[in-house]
Image: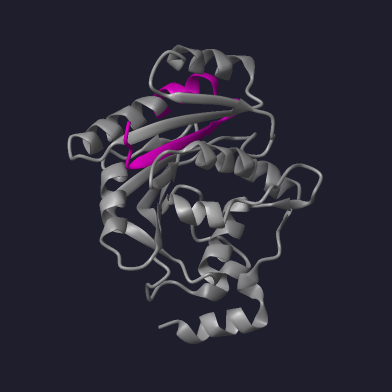
């Protein structure tokens, strides 16, 4: 079977919350398939609880690939999924979030039109759950983008589409408890930017992100006062050159 894009879903303790996630993925995959973009689905269950394991058992005899790992680390779970992919492009989806209908198709077509490597992100995040708001993302070549802001905050997260070769060359770093490091998505944004890979938003696309009261990896990292790993972006030579390139 030939695939254009692999959607990798790391699963942990989502249980039945994974059901609307999968429905949104199936819907987006059908939309893309009707337009000749084939989607591979890969589930990476990383130390799943009983309810999460029981939910994904229903897909054992389907075309969906399901792996169980013991990393205890979201970045390493994503990297494992990338290693199992058969597609040229990769997208990630947390097991309690939702795809927009046109995300798979539009992001692949957007990247295909680019002469150089880029990482694609949705134009909007719609946050729901504990509180509700809309977050407009910006491209790294936008007048709104300021590279110096990456010193204290991340512009993007792991909701992206990228060529597989980029994710193999720049995998997510481990943020396993006890190391003192967190925010693997922030670190990945900085590392890829330092390598000259731009981050672009795809017009007219959206991602729906569930905000839980407690238990998210971001919440744990923030409460634990974890730090981002050192990154080449903040090497004085690299960072000053990036500042000079800003419009």
- The residue furthest bottom is 244
Residue 20 spot, x, y in % from top left: 40, 25
Q: Residue at x 58, y 38 (%)?
A: 80
Count how many numbered circles sit on residues in the image: 0
**Quick one: quadrant of the C terminus?**
bottom left
Q: Is residue 224 above or below residue 101?
A: below
Residues drawn in magenta: 1-21
Q: Residue at x 42, y 24 (%)?
A: 64
Residue 63 vertical placement versus 238 (above, below): above
Can residue 7 be found in the magenta stretch?
A: yes
Query: Front-most of 194 and 246?
Result: 194
Quarter where residue 143 is shown: bottom left
Q: Quadrant of the N terminus?
A: top left
Picture coordinates of residue 54, whole percent (x, y):
54, 12
The image position of residue 31, as x and y in percent, is: 22, 35
Is 69 rendered above or below residue 198?
above
- Residue sitting at x 41%, y 29%: 21
Q: Nearer the viewer, residue 88 or 126?
A: 88
Q: Residue furthest front?
A: 1
Q: Residue at x 69, y 29 (%)?
A: 70
Of residues 133 and 63, the one drawn nearer to the viewer in this rendering:
63
The colouring scheme, among rainbow, by chain, secondary structure or one colour, is one colour
In screen coordinates, is 102 left or right of 139?
left
Judged left or right of residue 18, residue 111 is left
Residue 84 vs 49, above or below: the answer is below
Residue sticking out furthest to the right:
178
Residue 50 location (% of width, % of height): 62, 14
Magenta-span inclusion, residue 214? no
């Amino acid at each position: 079977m030939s695939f254009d894009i692999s959607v990798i879903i790391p699963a942990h303790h989502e249980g039945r919350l994974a059901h609307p996630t999968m429905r949104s993925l199936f819907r987006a995959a059908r939309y893309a398939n009707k337009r000749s973009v084939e989607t591979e689905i890969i589930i990476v269950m990383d130390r799943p609880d009983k309810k999460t394991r029981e939910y994904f058992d229903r897909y054992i005899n389907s075309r969906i690939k399901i792996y169980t790992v013991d990393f205890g680390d979201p970045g390493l779970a994503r990297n494992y999924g990338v290693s199992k992919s058969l597609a040229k492009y990769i997208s990630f989806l947390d097991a309690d979030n939702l795809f927009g209908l046109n995300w798979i198709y539009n992001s692949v077509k957007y990247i295909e039109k680019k002469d150089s490597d880029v990482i694609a992100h949705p134009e909007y995040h719609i946050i729901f759950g504990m509180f509700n708001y809309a977050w407009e993302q910006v491209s790294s070549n936008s007048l709104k983008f300021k590279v110096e802001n990456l010193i204290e905050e991340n512009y993007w997260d792991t909701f992206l589409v990228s060529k597989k070769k980029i994710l193999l060359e720049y995998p997510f770093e481990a943020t396993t408890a006890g190391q003192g490091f967190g925010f693997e998505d922030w670190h990945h944004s900085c590392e890829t930017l330092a390598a000259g890979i731009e981050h672009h938003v795809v017009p007219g696309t959206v991602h729906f992100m569930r905000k839980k009261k407690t238990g998210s990896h971001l919440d744990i990292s923030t409460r634990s006062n974890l730090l981002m790993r050192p990154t080449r972006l903040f090497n004085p030579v690299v960072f000053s050159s990036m500042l000079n390139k800003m419009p």
